[in-house]
Amino acid sequence: MNQTKRTYTIPLITLTSLFFMWGFITCMNDILIPHLKEMFSLSYLQAMLVQFCFFGAYFIGSFIYFLISYFYSDPINRIGYKNGILIGLLISALGCLLFYPAAEYAQYGLFLSAFFILGLGFTLLQITANPFVALLGEQHSASGRLNLVQGFNSLGTTLAPVVGGYLIFDLFAHGHEITGKETKIPYLVFGLVFLLLFVLVKLVKLPIFQNDNVQAKGLGALQFPQLKLGAVGIFCYVGAEVAIGSFLINFMMLPEIADIPENAAKNYLALYWGGAMIGRFMGAISANHQINRYKKAGYMLVVATLIFLLIFSVVDLSFGQMRVFALLVLCNLLAFHIGRSVASQKLLLFAVINILLLLSAVFLSGNVAIWSLLAIGLFNSVMWSNIFTLAISGLKEHTSQGSSLLVMAILGGALVPLLQGAIADTWGLQQSFLLPVVCYLYITYFGYYCLKRNLN
């Protein structure tokens, strides 16, 4: 047992750095959307083409992967998880570097191309890294490990609005003029970071996981109903999470809501993603079956407090403004206690809470509406890891193919924000948040399905 822990510590740390980086870059989209919207005088629908290209690449990349696995055999099972990660890092670096010419020539089409290439790189990283983390230990603790690395992914999404906002709006800004050139240097640095991660992964010795049936073909993964239902769950979860994050800044800038300036709204966006970070670290503790419930509660409270202080130290918000967030964190801790260590039960409960929060944001206004949307980050926290692990549970040699189908379902991040943008242009931004309600209704159903069938 100790040997296993020693063997997997370095690989887990290495993979955690990848999750942090792609979380950081993904959240930069939320910073750039209102920035590009103003720069190119875009409608909400046109601005959402950023997410359409970025997350649409997930669908196209994973669909190609799925076709290869169907007609030939699973590519990752042939080349190995490590080589898959290395290829994904190179493509991600290329995508970041393409922001330089896009910013230099100030062409929206070039920006969209860069987002697409970056999304392709992240696709391969998602297909390889998520199941790889799940394999680094016992099956019953896979959800906890994914929550842990997803916590560092959320650390990246929390720091991105503050750090990325400073780089674009302050350090490399050209006064009050928006030219697009302020994105050149930040994304050049991001590209170099991905190249450094490539070298790191190349040098680190990672364990080899390879199924005996390397020539497995066909649609074997689709024989599992939990995978098919889970794929729709991923579509809905990613679509809702991305759409809410994409529109949060514009929502807070509405005169009838709060009329918060763009450069100040980015701090509140950090709370949305910071809430997901708190919830994911607490979720990693909650999934540990070797700790009794009272110690879990204590550990979770300590972790939540430390991360709250970290977030408070990086955002430009007063303690008075953060008090509401602290109360919401305590509510999240209570929800974890009610959901216990049952992944499907927590998924169902958190989805219901998010539905109530969204309805509050749609039909109320002011601080209540804003904090309702921000609180959703806390309850989104464990959804990716719980849906993912429930969906691939028991797939065995079909795990990589199943993983590609789940990553394909990230298409929700492309289509749901685009559809919400069209609704916002037609009926209003606040009313458009009824669309994510539909997404969480399905996740509620998936959680109930898995709970009734004892899938955990």
Image (cartoon, rainbow, N blue to C red):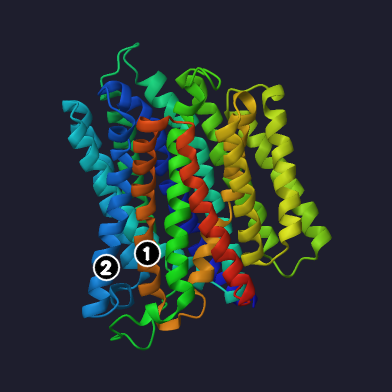
- State which quadrant residue 140 falls in: bottom right
Could you tell me if the residues under marks 1 and 2 are in contact, i.e. CB atoms within 8 Å?
yes
Q: What residue type is labelled 2?
A: Tyr
Left or right: residue 309 versus residue 163 is right
Q: Which residue is drawn at 57% across and 69% down?
A: 142
Above or below 272: residue 291: below
- Quadrant occupied by the N terminus: bottom right
Image quarter where the C terminus lies is bottom right
Amino acid under disc 1: Ile
Q: Is mark 2 on a helix, strand or loop?
A: helix
Q: How far apart are marks 1 and 2 (CA)?
A: 9 Å
Is 327 situated left or right of 242 in this image?
Answer: right
Residue extending farthest to the front is 427
- Using a 10 Å C-alpha cutoff, classify the residue at mark 1 as few (fewer than 14 neighbours), some (14 to 19) or many (20 or more): many
According to the picture, the residue beneath numbered tag 2 turns out to be 65
Mark linked to residue 127: 1
Q: Can residue 17 be seen in this view?
A: no
Q: Considering only vertical position in the picture, is 365 above or below 255?
A: below
Residue 250 percent location from the top left of the image: 44, 27
